[in-house]
Amino acid sequence: MPKEIAANKISFITGIWDLGRDQSNPGWNRSFDHYIENFIRLLNEMRDFNLIIFIDKSLEELVWQHRDPVNTRVYRHSKEQFKPPFFPFFEKIQTIRNNPEWYNQAGWLKDSTQGSLEYYNPMVMSKMFLLHNAKCFNPFDSDYFYWIDGGLSNTVSLGYFNNPMVIDNLLDLSDNFLFIAFPYETSSEIHGFNIEGMKKYAKNNKVNRVARGGFFGGHKDSISAANNLYYSLLQDTLDNGYMGTEESIFTIMTYLDPFTYHYEMIEDNGLIYYFFEQLQKTNTKPKINKTNLYIITFNSPQQLQMVLESFEKYDNNFLDKTNKILINNSTNESLFTEYDKIVEKYQFEQIRNGNLGICGGRQLAAEHFAKSDAQHMIFFEDDMLLDYEGSCNFGFKKRVPDLYHGLMKIMHKEGYDFIKFSFSEFYGHNGDQWSWHNVPYHQKIEYFGELHDKPLTKFNNIKTLNGLPYADGEIYYSNWPHIISQEGNKKCFIDTKWDHPYEQTWMSHIYTLTKQHKVKPAILLASPITHNRVHHYHANERREN
């Protein structure tokens, strides 16, 4: 990524404050001059990037000696402002750090920075709040925001940021929110936060990593939610007498929701330079979500283009965050050149094995996915488009902001085998149980009794995640767009195969697996998909398999 593009997309947030380290404990051998030196290095070495600085008024002139106002913003914030109203937990922190029950957990704790310095924890625990403020101010209209410690250049060469690959890989890791973590085994405490309390709040019986506070951040759309969770955890833990540093709360966040609060591991010495060293390696480009997008197309590059343009219009993550595979069933060779142009433009892998039919192509996608290292696959036909306008016939809204990430978060949280995107489909809706038409007669009697028409769908749970509602239960399978896990793919398409599969066959088979509690499907209570075939082909060319 060219440096000038990266500079426009990113804002780095930093600040330094004289907390009295050298006066409190001369043995630490870190005077404020040490931090000033490293801060000046940061100002200079990050000169090509937007920098948002929170700093005491007395140090503002220092900033302008080294920075250009074009890409620098200074917000005055004194050490004393790490008290209420900006930081409402100041007194709670003083009470805990002066409590022998807290500082006697470990011999080093009483004389540590968080134990002996009045403003240390209020300052480091405010980093998330300052990051959020910077995102709200957003003076440079940036998409990504990262906190970077003012003294980080003491251990990390900021020259890493001059490498476009480092920036490209950093953004690739920051779909949501990024932390850097190192392995840490303990049976007592983490930065003074009792390990049993860590386990309780992390909802995990094995807490064995620590998320660093020197560098963190992510996409602007994730920062408010991160700030809210951080605030609530900080308030709750302090209310109950637990205290470490900001890193203790960050660590808990990575356990509660490791999809949203993605973490990259570094070496057990905790030095952040290792993270940037890995980012500059071509063959180790990281990926948060390994997801394959499969689109089946037949004899109409214009129809395929419509699908891709719907992604670009409503949620470009389907194109930006996936490995894209085009299963091209086309038989008209005169169209191949036009298809090849689309493949090159959007960076698809193209598979041409003749006209496999719709279900033959779907089976090929399942087998290709099973051999890949992707965690999920998303399936589309070329006449099924994202469409956020209005409501469906059933009454559900079609607009689903950030659909891609919403699906990923639900899959991660719930462990579903698959989720269908759209409650309404071309021939009906998912309020009716269409599997009734397709299961064998003896199973129809077993499952539905002597009904003379399809029953209503049985839903087990109706839930919501970040405003996106969904339901699980006896959701029938269809070839409409869906996301499926590796395990779900194996159970639905790999363990049992048919030489000539039909959609009805899969619907019956997967419904039986669902009734046997072997498959756990779900569906969005929304309808962001519209069937819209504009470019038609002859009916006698259509194949199922």
Image (tube, rainbow, N blue to C red):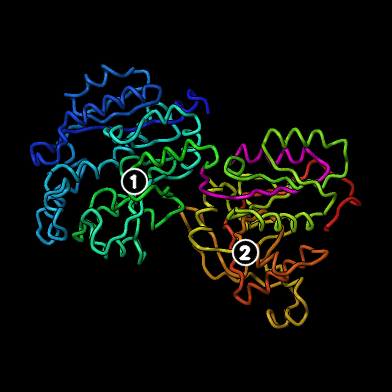
Say what secondary structure mark 2 lies in: helix
Closer to us: 91 or 71: 71
Q: Earlier in the sequence, mark 2 or mark 1?
A: 1
In the rendered view of the protein, which quadrant contains the C terminus?
bottom right
The amino acid at mark 1 is: Asn
Q: Observer-nearest residue: 423 or 3? A: 3
Q: What's the mark number on residue 488? A: 2
Task: Report x, y in % for residue 258.
Answer: 43, 54
Does 463 sit left or right of 74 as displayed?
A: right
Q: Which residues are magenta?
A: 286-314
Q: Residue at x 61, y 37 (%)?
A: 313
Q: Which residue is mark 1?
A: 227
Q: Which mark is residue 276?
A: none
- Front-most of 20 and 381? 20
Between 375 and 473, the one lying in front of the other is 375
Inspect the magenta stretch and tell me whether residue 20 lies in it: no
Q: Position of residue 540 (x, y in %)?
A: 91, 52
